Amino acid sequence: MSGQPRADIASLSVEQAKARLRAGESRSDHAALDKLTDADIRLQAAEDPEERDWDWARASLELPTPPSFKPPSRPRSAGR
């Protein structure tokens, strides 16, 4: 990748995106998406050069922890 933004990708804030959706401004073809089968999606992923080399069996989900997050303290059991 060149590091340059793609011409077909818009940069919006969450508020701007929500406002556009409320106004009915969406280029998503939901009818076409609803017609896709699991096989169609697998085929598209297999043909996508950016997805082809991923080993999804070894994928993991990692979420950032907010800096102010403090895990809740565990109550001690009565036997301790």
Image (cartoon, rainbow, N blue to C red):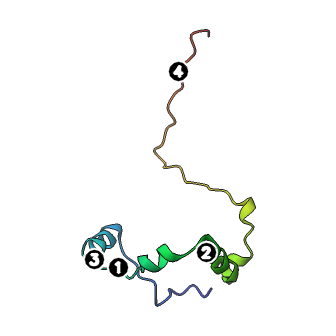
Give the mark nearer the N terminus: 1 vs 2: 1
Q: Would you identify the image quadrant in which residue 1 lies? A: bottom right
Give the mark nearer the N terminus: 4 vs 3: 3
Q: Helix, strand, or loop for circle 1?
A: loop
Give the mark nearer the N terminus: 4 vs 1: 1
Determine whether label 1 and label 3 are within 8 Å by CB: yes
Provide the residue designation for mark 3. 24
Disc 2 marks a residue whose amino acid type is Ile
Nearer to the camera, 12 or 41: 41
73 is higher (above) or lower (below) than 56: above
| Left/right of residue 11 with respect to residue 44 in the rendered view | left
Point 35% across, 67% down: residue: 14
Point 38% across, 82% down: residue: 27
Where's residue 36, x and y in %? 54, 76
Nearer to the camera, 12 or 27: 27
Disc 1 marks a residue whose amino acid type is Ser
Separation of residues labelled 1 and 2 (CA atoms) = 21 Å
| Left/right of residue 30 with respect to residue 77 in the rendered view | left
Q: Could you classify mark 3 by the number of other residues whose Cα lies within 10 Å: few (under 14), some (14-19), or many (20 or more)?
A: few
Disc 4 marks a residue whose amino acid type is Pro
Q: Of the numbered discs in the image, which one, if any, rests on residue 26?
A: 1
* Figure label count: 4
Separation of residues labelled 4 and 3 (CA atoms) = 49 Å
43 is higher (above) or lower (below) than 58: below
Separation of residues labelled 1 and 3 (CA atoms) = 6 Å
Nearer to the camera, 67 or 65: 65
Provide the residue designation for mark 4. 75
Give the mark nearer the N terminus: 4 vs 2: 2
